[in-house]
Amino acid sequence: MRALFLAFAVVVSLVPLWPVYQNPAFFVAVAGGALLGAFIALLSARGKWSVLRTALMAVAAYLIFGVPLAVPSEAFLGFLPSLQGELNLLTGVVLSWKQLVTVMPPVGAYEALLVPVFLLSLLGVLLAVVLSLRIIRTRGIASVAALVPVFTLGVAIWLGPSRSFASVVVTVGVFVLIAMWFALSRVGVARAGFRAIGILVLSAVVASAVVLVTPITDRTVWRTEIDQPFVLQDDTSPLSEYRSFVTGDDKNKDLLSVTGLSAGQRLSIATLDNYTGVLFSVGGVAADFTKLPGSIPTTSKTGDEVTAQVTISGLTGAWVPLTGELGSLSFTGAGSRALTDAFYYSRPAGTGAVMTGLAEGDSYRTTGLAAPEVSISSVGSLKPGDAIVPAPQVMPDGLDAFVSLSSKGKTSAGERVQAALTALTSQGYISHGGPNEVPSASGHGANRLAALFAASPMVGDAEQYAAAASLMATQIGFPSRVVMGFIAPEGSDAGTPVSFTGAEMTAWIEINTTNGWVAVNPNPAERPIPEEQPQDPTEVAFPQTAVEPPAQDEPQLNDNSAPEAADEEQPTAVDPVLQAILAVVNVVGWSLLWLGVLASPFLAIVIAKRRRRAARHSAADPRDRVEGAWSEVRDALLDHGTAASASMTRQELAEITALPAATTVAVLADTAQYSVDDVTESDVIRAWSEADGVVKELDANLTRWQKFRAKISVKSFGLSWARFTAWLPKRR
């Protein structure tokens, strides 16, 4: 059955949605919807159902089979519909389309996000098969049914990912299946072949335009255009609240309890990669928070998988502590569904947040891939990675000098980072600035870090040391970021719950290497702080002599050590005239492309007529060439609107036109067909000359628009607008 080709084209057109789901449930939903649609279409055609009855059967099938196929998580016993599943199914008809583009792919079988692909498969196959069978029964034109897979293909690409080359391949495949469907039509081999070739040419033009003109990596789809409902502000920084945890009311307060952490394993609250000169924040490439479909594949190549059960006590707010690059997360207990709907995750930052905020008693189970920890002594063998992090907007005074002095004589980037971090931990001392502690100002802005580098001894805490270490690593060439969270103390066991208080809050850095992100602890060990050294030591007086004193060694600042990944690219100045010309060329190019696509059917008709004329004019037998001249006259008469029946003789049709040249060609054609005399070359030349004269006389009194309509008329191919509209329901 040729309608199956069209149904298969609908199924193939949904392939661009696979990267969004990446779950076997996708194939189940597509196959189930296609089988239901085809079954209902066959029953409708066989029983000659009305449009209303067919639509009601489709709605019934959607409600009966929709839950196990499109909302499998709500199916009772895995295959029976449930009340909650039916509610999700009904609301999903309207809401799931936008939800699909706001959830981070792959979405799998999350909630009711399979509803769009199930609906497209069910309704697409149903319409394609019904229209195809109705067209056969009413002898209408096939182009209407062919629009169904084209429509589903467009919707699938619009809902799909922004980066996918498969869409081009699928587009060609869909048009090839449509062409095969045309080729199997019952309107004759010649016309079917002509239509199939036209469809294939059109698909090749469209595919070539997509490949050559549209950048595949920058395709604009709904997912890239829609505003995400959760975006953190640029000044969002939990690190700015560090002192309130370690010295404020939360110092001795249980913030959360975790089961699953062993000694030394980390629980991160937020990853901060954007330094504004005032604070480290979740910004730049890390600010794109999207909904999480329950689980996502991790992209890191290294790290340990850590699964933990977290229960919130006093740690409230938007941030959700995680064990590393998120693999899965499921809220448990009361309010779990609301928390799941409100949870968003930033894959670049590895940071999660809840719009409504966490509250005491909230709990969840999470699995993550933790960045492996390396000691400072092992950093020297590492090489910078190629991760992209925002370039620091400001560098503190004294940082470059500190790096230059501490890493003097070191050559590789890893050795320089190791030397700088070693100097930071050896020269630094810990103080939170609390009661009975050495004064230590809070904050990690450029001024505070400049004071840290200038002080002797250096006094601060994890807020300052993590920020300074991250900026030093970035300056040397390692993409770096600050992470704030907790570290399981010595003696912790994965099977025993561990409670964390505000005093145990800390911060560390992660640097990107050729092996991925690794965690480094840049905080000095706690030890007694010596007395402050004088800021202006007595200068050494050189003796009065004519000989110049020896030059003092001054630290040479290395301004060329900043990483390429962290440097802001300076935009190249573009000539305004050239920019205007390029804009005009772009508009003209796209306009010509679309005009070419729109004009391609008319060009195909003109080319087909010329090839038909050439075939008649170059026939081997002179008799066939003379008869071909008359066929050319007859086709011209039909295309110019002359009504002719199949029973008319050549001379009867010529008399209707009242054109002497038409009568001459009719006589020559009758003589060639029925006379036993030989047809000479002069007869052939005369017949074609008179035929061309007929066409000129027909065009003589026509307007340009009437001439154009005659050139693109398809009446001479046996087609008419009546056949285009024959499938439409008639008024009774």
Image: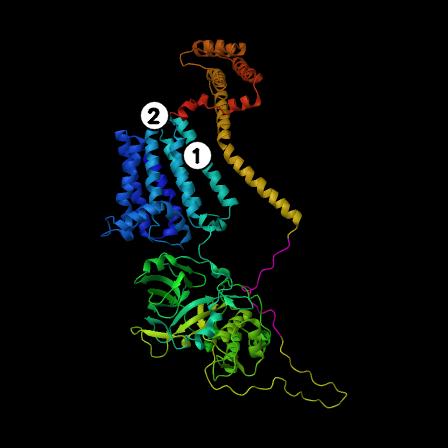
The answer to whether 693 appears left or right of 730 in the picture is right
In which quadrant is the N terminus drawn? top left
- Quadrant including the C terminus: top left
- Are there few (<14), some (14-19), or many (20+) residues within 10 Å of tag 2? few
What residue is rendered at 38% in x and 30% in y?
142
Nearer-the-camera pick, 586 or 224: 224
Dot 2 or dot 1: first in sequence order is 2
Q: Nearer the viewer, residue 66 or 354?
A: 354
Label 2 and label 1: CA atoms lie apart by 23 Å
Could you tell whether 59 is left or right of 283 in the image?
left
> Which contiguous range is marked in magenta?
557-573
Residue 368 appears left or right of 471? left
Around disc 1, counting alpha carbons within 10 Å, would you say few (fewer than 14), some (14 to 19), or many (20 or more)?
A: many
- Residue 296: image location, x then y, percent: 37, 58
Q: Residue at x 48, y 86 (%)?
A: 528
Q: What residue is shown with label 1?
A: 199
In the displayed structure, 567 sits above or below 710; it is below
* Secondary element at image label 1: helix
Membership of 116 in magenta stretch: no
Residue 364, how many percent across, how many down?
Answer: 33, 64
Residue 564 on the magenta segment: yes
- Give above or below for 472 relative to 161: below
Q: Which residue is mark 2?
A: 138
Task: Report x, y in % for residue 203.
Answer: 45, 38
Say if residue 170 shows up in the picture. Answer: no
Q: Position of residue 681 (x, y in %)?
A: 52, 15
Taking the view exactly as shown, the residue that stands out farthest to the left is 77
90 w.r.t. 673: above or below: below
